[in-house]
Amino acid sequence: MLKQHSQLMLTLLIISDAVAITLAWLAAYWLRFTWLPVSPEKGIPALADKYLPMLPLVVLAHLITFYRIRLYRPRRERSLFSETRDILKAFVVAVVAVVMIDYALPATNKISRSFIATYAVVGAASFALFRGVVRAVLQALRRRGWNRRTAAIVGSGRSAQRLLHALRRNEWTGIEVLYFVDDAGSTDDAPRLHQVPVRGPVADIRRILEREPVDAVFLALSNEQAGRAEEILEQLETSTADVRLVPDINPGFTLRPNVSELDGVAILSVRQTPMYGWNALAKRAFDVVMGGLFTLLATVPMLVIALAIKLTSRGPVFYRQRRVGMDGREFALVKFRTMRADAEADGPVWSRQKDDRRTAVGAFLRRTSLDELPNLFNVLAGHLSLVGPRPERPEFIAQFKQEIPRYMLRHKIKAGMTGYAQVMGLRGESSLRKRIQYDLHYIRHWSLGLDVRILARTLVGAWFSEHEK
């Protein structure tokens, strides 16, 4: 019955996608030629002349693109953000396909370029919203017991229990664990783990599945049992259940883990930066646009600060300091000088509160974080991001990476002017270990929305106190 539901859902989804594309195409025509300016010489083209005849090709191009980008694969375990990102990617590719179709048509049948631009915006927004509504409806139905899938977890150790708790916390996946399979269990008088029965032994998994069939089997073996994976997979060959592998890896050592495939070989990446592909492009575009705007707004204050520094102390206005950014690359961080010119004649020293090396103007700049304004030049140059873990000096990193576990993971993303740890109040002489926890949380859960929230908290004064330099 579940498989029938899956086929039915897939059919309904494809049909609803076709309807959504059609409505977006018609809405774009109405918006472009009713609400937006139209050239008097060209007039308003008739819908039936070019736009309706092209519609079947447009719908077909979209559906093929969505299929190739796997929008019709089960996505129960995907987050809302990752699904929306994939949908927008697919829609961009589909619009490019529409442009190519238009170029292939005779000159008399070509459609307006401004219409295609309008459709790209209207279609992408409406389709993402449509799929979001579909997702919300499916999740609500699954919570009420419809279209749910049953599962068994092979193993009962750390990774198996983490998986059970993760599925329970995310009921929208619609996956219900019926039992564990482990050598500690039996089929006659089954013990229970977190209120879930434990069947066993593992060597009898074929018979267990025949007696209690499930839709999916998760192999969550401990490292000591990993050598049995091939034996278990051979027994599962007679089952129609989906099989998924859950490696026994401490989550503290992972960073946005991802599985890829190379010529049939599955590769698990446990330390992957979120800054690749569209993510990198989106973050860089955000930095350039917002960084340029902030630089423009800060021009007059920076000129006033530069004049105050020059008039009150000897030495340069700016201070360049070596810092370490993404992937361990060093760059020169630009700040306003807040200390005497000879403050580090004896070598780098960790900044302290009420540091007697600071100038009168420098103390104020530190207290208000205005000395960081020239960091905007680093942002525009690409050395720094507006939001990210604060960059540290290489001399201190050599010490920290030996003393603080997973310290170097914070270098898997571009360093920032402000960061999650800073707006959460971790600055100055606060615990470095605690800051690292917040930095890694930021990297694991990065999104543009999170960047905007951190930046907003910074701008409204969450960072207006003395912090590390």
Image: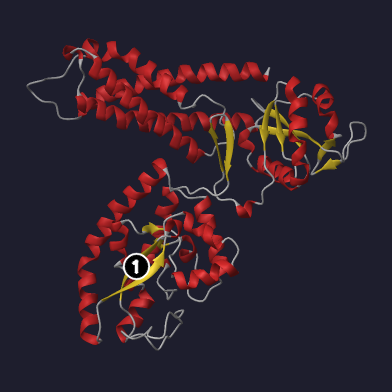
Residue 76, by quadrant, is: top right
> Residue most toward the left?
41
Query: Does 435 sit left or right of 452 as displayed?
Result: right
Q: Amino acid at mark 1?
A: Leu
Q: Which residue is mark 1?
A: 333
Q: Position of residue 101 (x, y in %)?
A: 28, 18
Instruction: Count the labels in the image.
Output: 1
Q: Position of residue 278 (x, y in %)?
A: 39, 41
Q: Is residue 79 above or below residue 358?
A: above
Q: Quadrant of the C terminus?
A: bottom left
Q: Position of residue 323 (x, y in %)?
A: 40, 67
> Residue most toward the right?
188
> Is 332 in front, or is 286?
332
> Residue most toward the bottom?
356
Say whether residue 426 is visible.
no
Say whether residue 46 is visible.
yes
Q: Quadrant of the N terminus?
A: top right
Q: Residue at x 86, y 34 (%)?
A: 201
